[in-house]
Amino acid sequence: MTMTRVADFHVNYTAFLDADGTLMRDQVLPTFSLDSAVLKPLYRQMVLTRTFDNKAVALQRTGRLGTYGSCLGQEAVGVGLGAALNPDDVLVPSFREQAAQIMHGSRMEDILLYWGGDERGSQMQSTPQSQDFPICVPVGTQAAHAVGVARAIQLRGEKRAVVCAMGDGATSKGDIYEAMNFAGAWKLPILFYIANNQWAISVPREEQTSCQTLAQKAIAGGFEGEQVDGNDLLAVHDRCKKSLNRIRNGEGPHLIEAITYRLNDHTTADDATRYREDKAVAAHWKRDPIVRLRNHLVNLECWTKQDEEKAIQDAARAVEDAVQNYMHMKPQPVESMFDHLYAELPEAYQHQRAHAIACAAAKAAEE
Ligand SMILES: [Mg+2]
């Protein structure tokens, strides 16, 4: 018997910045990696993301927001992608893509509305040009929607890309495998974008799957997957840009696994100290994507203490404006809770809707 090797696969990994933000000059660097006009706005965007994220957690802790999923530590994953999107690309997020959503046109107050339990946070009124999807909490279920959008774009012959964003936990769900199979079989214009933050709620990456990489899951779908240092803005942005360009040019689907670390709890309903050591988290703070890019900017001699102070002040002001808009939004009418799940409201709910309206009117009359 002769055994013949019939297939070979590989998974590449890209990083340009060391953990301390020093450029690895032995690599072929993207031209923008030395261009302060490109890098400074991206740095400011990461600062804005963190400021927004910290504020959202504070709003939840003081009873002014519902459960919220923090993206602390994952700012480069979101900003690197957000800066690579064209306005008419379609972002189909899960629930930790705040940075990319904001860069693609979502208002911060809309994201707060979503987590505040207000239907208007899912209406995506601020991003009509992009047709982005709202936040999706049920893990992995957005993948079938994303593939459907990609198929529609393909049938229309448009040069647009879809990004199906997810966490590492989603890659263990059947929905994702099915979506990737469709994408490969139909050569759809879609990027599967995994923020591998090492935790599926309380399950560590190594217990969740025995796969050596999550990127290799693309191979079974018939397309390539790659890894990138998700805390290196330069690497994330470069790989996303190249991937999305190929996708828009009709070269079929692609997968990027951005390796990062969730520095906060899974959501504000979680307490990560119950299942992981503080010292493990502290080690990952040393790879903070914001500090790394700041060190790189300082090394390029294009970032000063004054620049830093201004970036922090500008971000605080923008976030505070969004919070004020959110807090002063007039509440929705009570019947709105019935108005978005069905195209036509089933009879069983019609009398409940009428009852809710009557109760609200009676309460208003009492006041
Ligand atoms: Mg995760």
Image (cartoon, rainbow, N blue to C red):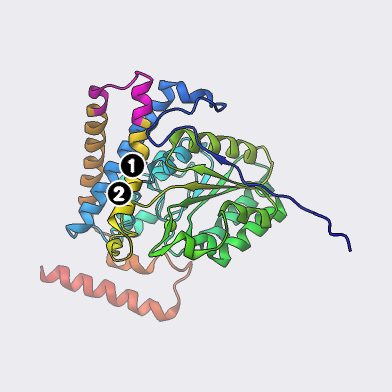
Q: Residues within 10 Å of mark 1 (few under 14, many from 20)?
A: few
Q: Which residue is mark 1?
A: 286
Residue in the foreground of this view, choosing between 179 and 322: 179
Distance, label 2 to label 1, CA atoms, is 7 Å
Q: Which residues are magenta?
A: 294-308
Q: Residue furthest top?
A: 301
Does 310 sit above or below residue 281? above
Q: Callout 1: helix, strand or loop? A: loop
Residue 5, x across and y down, in percent: 80, 54
Q: Which mark is residue 209?
A: none
Q: Residues within 10 Å of mark 2 (few under 14, many from 20)?
A: few
User: Residue at image x 68%, y 43%?
Assistant: 157
- The residue lying at 69 percent from left, 41 percent from top is 251
| Amino acid type, callout 2 | Ala
Query: Relative to 22, is 120 above or below?
Result: below
How many labels sit on residues? 2
Callout 2 secondary element: helix
Residue 282 - label: 2
State whether residue 64 appears in this view: no
Report x, y in % for residue 243: 59, 39
Distance from mark 1 CB to nearest ligand 1 atom below 8 Å: no
Q: Tell me: 227 left or right of 110.
A: right
